[in-house]
Image (tube, rainbow, N blue to C red):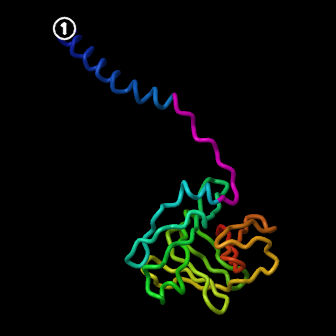
Amino acid sequence: MTATRRMALAGIFAISTSLLTPCLAQQAGSAPAAAQPAGVLKPADTATLMPSQVFFRGQSATVQMRNSGGVRFGDGMLTLMALVDTSGYSSGIQQRYQAYLITEVPLEVGGGSDARRLVPGAYGVGFIQNDRFVVMDLGAHELLSVASHHDAELHRPMPLQVLDTPAAGTYRLYEGRSFVAFRRAQ
């Protein structure tokens, strides 16, 4: 090997090393993210995950982070929901659209013969008259409607919250005392 070729290879090695060293140091210095526990998320947890504004039916709406919740599943996948400011929408949309739902996994919404499957995505949702819960695509087209229920024994109703149920892997999305059950679909 000639001296010129050795010098060229040494230069390439030096440049490669200088480019890779910071990357390797950063990877070595950063600890892997600690595994997050599965279960119901608190509003403070969802505030770091949920966008502050969401798109629905041609407009952006501000998310009410204090009225948010969600679930982290055992594999780290998430389902998030939060109330939104719907003041800029028509009254027809406001009556049906109260919250935004984002899910990374398929869900079964409702229970028994009324249960419906919802694929991963982002949706507008709401509790409407006649004890119904509706899910709409981003264009405000209704995708599904299931029965909602009233929980007179809920001790501390909040504008929006997610709570565990005694049935493993099943959760309730509440708006006040109205709720709908959901779980990860098989």
Crowding around mark 1 (Cα neighbors within 10 Å: few <14, some 14 to 19, many 20+) is: few
Residue 107: x %, y % from top left: 62, 71
Residue 128: x %, y % from top left: 60, 87
Q: Residue at x 39, y 75 (%)?
A: 59
Residue 87: x %, y % from top left: 47, 79
**Residue type (three-letter) at the residue carrying disc 1:** Thr
Q: Nearer the viewer, residue 144 or 134?
A: 134
Q: Residue at x 80, y 81 (%)?
A: 152
Q: Assess whether residue 57 is covered by the magenta stretch.
A: no
Where disc 1 sits, the SS reads loop
163 horizontally vs 11: left or right = right
- Give the number of callouts: 1
Query: Magenta stretch: dominant SS?
Result: loop
Quadrant of the image containing the N terminus: top left
Q: Residue at x 63, y 41 (%)?
A: 34
Q: Nearer the viewer, residue 133 or 119?
A: 133
Q: Nearer the viewer, residue 9 or 178?
A: 178
Relative to 21, does residue 141 appear above or below in the rendering? below
Judging by the rendered image, the residue that carries numbered circle 1 is 2
68 horizontally vs 21: left or right = right
Relative to 92, does residue 104 appear above or below in the rendering? above
Quadrant of the image containing the C terminus: bottom right
Residue 50: x %, y % from top left: 52, 60
Q: Quadrant of residue 2?
A: top left
142 horizontally vs 112: left or right = left
Q: Residue at x 48, y 88 (%)?
A: 91
Q: Which residues are magenta?
A: 29-42
